[in-house]
Image: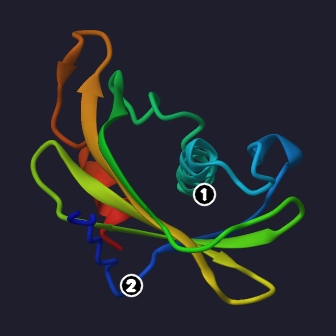
Amino acid sequence: MARVKLTLPEKSIFQTEIEVRITDLNYGGHVGNDNILSLMHECRMRFLASLGYKSEIGLGENIGIIISDVIISYKSESFYGDHLTVNISVDDFNKYGFDMFYELINKKTGQQVAIGKTGIVCMNYEKRKVSTIPETFLQQLQK
């Protein structure tokens, strides 16, 4: 069976820490696969907030982002109370979007818990159509 292969960019542009909540666990007692995506979403929101944005649909001129695809590679278990360091990087820019990468690392053990990528596409929510990346937002991402 072929496995998904994901290579992270060398440079991360944002780092945050997130604690695993009891609601992140599945019946196996570890973080559920679906909750890794939720943790990535929370960290993406923190990243956007660090740039001065209050939501994923508030990049200016009715422009926001949508997720076009997701890849997650699970590396190790994570449990209730674990503190995860999450590194975010961006790459593969085009006229309408880019890829955002996530590396989740157990702060105590240093072990990778998961790596992931979300394809980001800009959208004009008023027109309900794909839009070009707002220039100001693009400049913040490419610092």
Element on which disc 2 rests: loop
Q: Quadrant of the C terminus?
A: bottom left
Q: Which residue is mark 2?
A: 11
In-image side of 108 versus 112 (left or right): right
Question: Where does residue 72 sit, x and y in percent of width and height?
Answer: 42, 58
The amino acid type of the residue labelled 2 equals Lys
| Vertical position of residue 93 compared to residue 123: above or below | below
Q: Are marks 1 and 2 in contact (CB under 8 Å)?
A: no
Question: Where does residue 96 sit, x and y in percent of width and height?
Answer: 15, 42
Rendered residue at 84%/50% (across/down) = 21
Residue at the extreme top of the image, as rendered: 127
Q: Which residue is mark 1?
A: 50
Q: Quadrant of the N terminus?
A: bottom left
Camera-nearest label, 1 or 2: 2
CA gap, disc 1 and disc 2: 17 Å
- Mark 1, residues whose alpha carbon is within 10 Å: few (<14), some, or many (≥20)? few
Residue at the extreme front of the image, as rendered: 1
Residue placed most toward the observer, 6 or 133: 6
| Vertical position of residue 8 compared to residue 40: above or below | below
The answer to whether residue 130 is visible is yes
Question: Where does residue 140 sit, x and y in percent of width and height?
Answer: 38, 61
Element on which disc 1 rests: helix
| Vertical position of residue 104 compared to residue 9: above or below | above
In-image side of 66 versus 48 (left or right): left
The amino acid type of the residue labelled 1 equals Ser
Give the total of numbered labels: 2
Rendered residue at 75%/57% (across/down) = 30
